[in-house]
Image: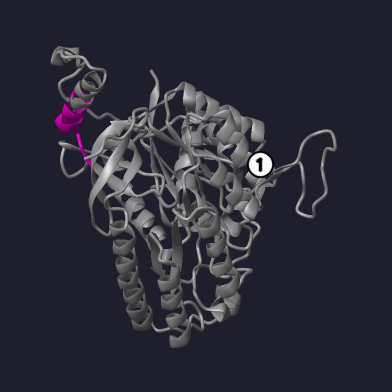
Amino acid sequence: MSKKVYIESYGCQMNVSDSEVVASILAKQGYQAAASAEEADLVLLNTCSVREKAEYTVLQRINEMNRLKAGNKELKVGVLGCMAERMKEQLLVEKKVVDLVVGPDAYRSLPQLLDEVGSGQKAVNVLLSREETYGEIVPVRLNSNGVTAFVTIMRGCDNMCAFCVVPFTRGRERSRDPQSILAECRQLVADGYKEVTLLGQNVDSYRWNIDARGNVKNPGEPVTDFADLLEMTATTCPELRIRYSTSHPKDMTDKVLEVMARHENICKYIHLPVQSGSSAVLKHMNRGYDREWYLERIAAIRRYMPDCAISTDIIAGFCGETEADHRDTLDLMAQVGYDMAFMFKYSERPKTLAARKLPDDVPEEVKGRRLAEIIEAQKTNSAKRMAGYVGQVHEVLVEGVSKRSAEFMYGRNTQNSVVIVPRYSTQFVVRRAQAAMEDCHRAGSRSFPPTNHEPRTIQEWRPGDLIQVRITSATAGSLQGEPVAPVNEPAMQA
């Protein structure tokens, strides 16, 4: 009898992708995916250490596992990912419910570790690797909508941003063989997926067959940078819409922007974390660029793709931040006009440069007030950007049924904005019929095609449909629209 595993993912998209790798490894050991933790023989929590709140959420969830174990003495609980590497001793000693602790580079060892757990021992492997990419492992898509998927192109990070714990929990940067990436994308097309997001902590520093110093490793093989990989993916899989995350301002090149502008199937959306609008704070953060450099990168994006959407990350109240620094951030936000932003109060993370060398000297109430002002400024920016789309016709990939009503579907345009459309379109069918009649009239025919020539009297939009949508209204968080045609048909005028 096969066992069941339930995997919960916390934090970034990379953790979701890692969970799919774990599911693939366990599937070969006979584990099937469980619908809930209550049904599982093994519960794995794939964790995040980027912010204190994320860790607190996971610790609370670990405490809840005691209830499940009380009802199922055979249940095993494991902690994976960044928290596993950073807090291994605490998890194993203080959290008696935890049987298994596995870091992000040690997932191949899960079968052996589970054997140890099965014999009544605690098991742990949090060793980091300079080579592991899981490149040849075919992920098991978890909680998939069958439309969009993630493909990890690199692991780890060599940037030592003062606030960030990722280099300590995920190790050094290493890139995945481009051919394995293309093979995974081709498989996604074969499986009916319509969009892929290429993932890395810093995708702009992706490099294959060349080291950090610029030395070619194998002269007989081509060198591949991120722009090359992006182009290879776009041309190899023209059926796929392509996104990527995350970029680093100090590494983004015009070559990447040129490729994006040249290929229609590469979405016109860039997540470019700024963290602060103050050059002084950016220096303290060890970000590797200043305000002027960042704004020049924004200008370059606008030159190549005037319609490109830009989102960002912002930290309020980093060490030493003054009111003038805070005003610089608000001013930069106004200049850029971000479509969306992830905004947080600074929280000190153990092992980081800031924790070791910089005092966390901005009072909590000041951090909270500054964050509130940043959030309010972004609400204004988002509303303005979204309102500017009203009246335009956008290509929208339908992803699923709206959470608010089964009568509506949701999808995203190339700018990554959520677009809500009616699930059923009678107006669309009427317009098709009208267009057919107008064609007959122009051809001089006195007889019009009967309405029963229409394949369906009502058009139902389904996940995976690519449709043209006229945007009719907007909020700061989403767009609403009316479908006017499938993508392979011309948009009809209202």
- Residue shown at the point (38%, 18%) measured from the top left: 1
| For residue 211, side relative to residue 266 (left or right) | right
Q: Nearer the viewer, residue 315 or 126?
A: 315
Q: Residue furthest bottom?
A: 323
Q: Nearer the viewer, residue 52 or 493?
A: 493
Q: Nearer the viewer, residue 241 or 23?
A: 241
Q: Is residue 104 visible?
A: no
* Residue at disc 1, secondary structure: helix
The image shows residue 209 at horizontal and vertical percentages of 76, 41
Asked if residue 190 is positioned above or below residue 334 in the image, the reply reads: above
The image shows residue 406 at horizontal and vertical percentages of 16, 36
- Residue shown at the point (64%, 69%) measured from the top left: 288
Q: How many marks?
A: 1
Q: Is residue 261 magenta?
A: no
Q: Nearer the viewer, residue 150 or 302?
A: 302
The image shows residue 27 at horizontal and vertical percentages of 47, 25
- In the image, which residues are magenta? 421-433
| For residue 344, side relative to residue 456 (left or right) | right
| For residue 352, side relative to residue 383 (left or right) | right
Q: Answer with the quarter of the image where residue 447 lies.
A: top left
> Looking at numbered disc 1 in the image, what kind of residue is underneath it?
Asp
Q: Answer with the quarter of the image where residue 341 lies.
A: bottom left
In the rendered image, the quadrant that contains the C terminus is: top left
The image shows residue 4 at horizontal and vertical percentages of 37, 28
Q: Residue furthest front?
A: 444
| For residue 420, side relative to residue 357 (left or right) | left
- Residue shown at the point (40%, 68%) measured from the top left: 344
Q: Residues within 10 Å of mark 1 (few under 14, many from 20)?
A: some
Q: Which residue is mark 1?
A: 228
Q: Residue furthest right?
A: 219
